[in-house]
Amino acid sequence: MAVQVSYPGVYIDEFTPGAPIQGVATNIAALVGVALRGPLDRPTRVTSWEQFQRVFGDEPVPGFYLWYAARGFFENGGTVCYVVRASDGDYDEASFDNRAGSPAIIVRARQPGVSGISVGVTEQHRLIAANTSLYRPAGVLQLQTGRDIELQPSQAWRFRAGDEITIAALGERRRVVRISGNVLRVSEAFVNAYAAGAAVRLADTQNSTRIVRLVSTVPVAPDALVTGTLLNFDPGGANVGGVVDSVQTEFMSDPLVPATTETSYRVTLRSPLGTGFSLDPGGTATPTQSEELRITVQLGGPTHYDNLAIDPAHPRYFVRIVNEAPAGLVEIQRLEPPPPTPLPENTLAGAALLALAGGAAENLAVLADVTSAVADAEFINALDTLRAIDEVTLIAIPDRRTAPVQQALVDHCQQLMDRFAIVDSNYDFSDDQHTDVEQQRTQLASERGYAALYYPWLRVSPKGSGEPMLAPPSGHVCGIIARSDASKGVHKAPANEIVNGAVGVERRMNKTDHGLLNLESINVIEQSGIGRPVLMGARTTATDLNWLHVSTRRLFNYLEESIQEGIRWAIFEPNNLQLWQKLRRSITDFLTRAWRDGALFGKTAEEAFYVRIDEELNPFSEQQLGRLYIEIGLRPTYPAEFIIVRIGIWPGGAEVSEG
């Protein structure tokens, strides 16, 4: 909007160009498979091999390969992956209500099957410290002069700036802004004139009150009154309370008698009390308690989790404490969004020990059966949980290589258009001509190249001692791609790369076999002599040869998603020439950076790409419909897959010229 001018002078009018486009991450993988333990059908973010072992088990499941795939991912330079544990099992669980009777949490056994676990909830009420109660200082009016309220000696020091006071409890409220000796300076003068001897005290709380003061006969422990503590100022009564947002300790002393001291705690609540109650010092003092929980988990003997808090900001938030217990038997899922119930009624209600139910044991024989449609469905269901994880860019399913599951994996990537499938070959080949893997390749066609097939299997070290064992290569390949992206960029073909963590391959092949498989777009991991295995293929399963190479498909995934997220700010902006110029500038700057990094081919940026936003693309009729079309042309760099050196005989010669 133009600056509104009125007086002669210099005016400042700031303008903002289109926001720069940041490139999205390209090296975040997802692995789906069978694990020893861990959450079922729930993507779990893992950032180290040690974390994977803590969550999903430090032993592989016999006959399955997720454990080896995850190890291979991190051995080859991967840093972040999501792991989904596929299973035909189910958890024992039970639902628990809050005090208002609405479902609040689900408690679930950590392992599938009939667990025999019972869980109970006990409400705990704990004094913050001995005789903790609302602080209710009071005094006697000696003189009222404008905004100054003079009290009798040794009374004003118990008040603090910010307190709201009243005189003779007649309803007038004023905020204390300064204390000097026996005088309280208030925000504005009282309307009424009060006689000497009138009682001066804190004003009663109101619906909007967020600050209260507490006092205790002994110091409050540092962990007893913290952010997230749920306080009840009227236990047994109206259940008036709130969650602590901050606490300020106030040390006070009588200036006339310095040995007379008190400590109060100014508590700011996260939300208003929503009700009023009396702070009359002549009334009955009510203790202030914290509302806490004990959760008991019983299997044989009981395990108690005490002094738990309902609020996530508290150090002993009940979900975190139970779920992160090293040897815990259960985990808690808090239902979201929480019921619209005010505190403290939305805290958990007490419940006697309740047996968890509904679990079903995991049947590994079914999961391993390559003919089982039930197993296929379980892996596809686990794959579908990754639809909600936008940052995933690579997906592999090392534990299920049936056609329905691998086709579902390819379809998943094609539909979402922001991720790439790493597909494992089978290993039970019938002969040395590799006909099985060639047949498998025909079932994985992806028109625009959202998948790649890798062959053969790797020989890797087993858990513990023993001879090397065979494992599918997808986890290692995901790690190689993540490493290549981080060091060289997504436009670099992830090939001619050593496979860390592998000591050999399932079978070696000669150059002729390698060439035949490469022409079929099967990416070969080769091993020569006693050397280490090397990934020597970077082709997709595309039917459209524009998308033949892994680097081309993934480069476009990267550019498309980066631009999509980077120009979201333009939605609902006025569709005019100024917007077109901002968008063209933002996209051009981003693609220029990609060209300078070597992702696009051309001597100049103009040779490498173009960005078109004009009236031919956007006639008035399209603008009326709220549409804005942008056309971008890109010239990607392709991998030098074959390097041909022409060498011939040169007869030589001499050339004579006059000087």
Image (spheres, rainbow, N blue to C red):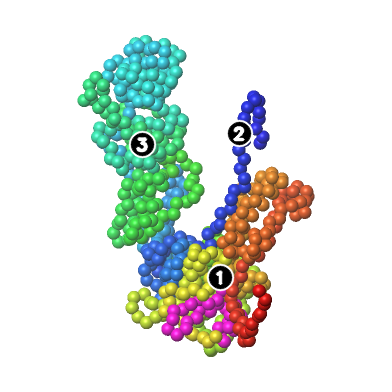
Give the residue drawn at x 56%, y 54%. Answer: 22
Residue ID for mark 2: 12
Decide: is 450 above or below 134.
below
Q: Are marks 3 and 1 in contact (CB under 8 Å)?
A: no
Decide: is 443 above or below 322.
below
Q: Position of residue 555 (x, y in %)?
A: 59, 64
Depth check, front residue: 73 or 115: 73
- Residues packed near mark 1 inside 10 Å, few (<14), some (14 to 19) or many (20 plus): many
Q: Is residue 623 magenta?
A: no
Residue type, numbered disc 2: Ile
Query: First in sequence: mark 2 or mark 3?
Result: 2
Q: Mark 1 or mark 2: which is in front?
A: 2
Residue 617, can we see it? yes
Depth check, front residue: 353 or 470: 470
Q: Which residues are magenta?
A: 512-538
Residue ID for mark 1: 493
Side of 624 where 504 appears, left or right: left
Q: Which mark is residue 247?
A: 3
- Secondary structure under the numbered disc 2 in the rendered image: loop
> Residue 642 sits in which quadrant?
bottom right
Depth check, front residue: 255 or 641: 641
Give the residue drawn at x 55%, y 83%. Answer: 514
Residue type, numbered disc 3: Val
Depth check, front residue: 217 or 108: 217
Residue type, numbered disc 1: Ala
Q: Position of residue 367 (x, y in %)?
A: 48, 74
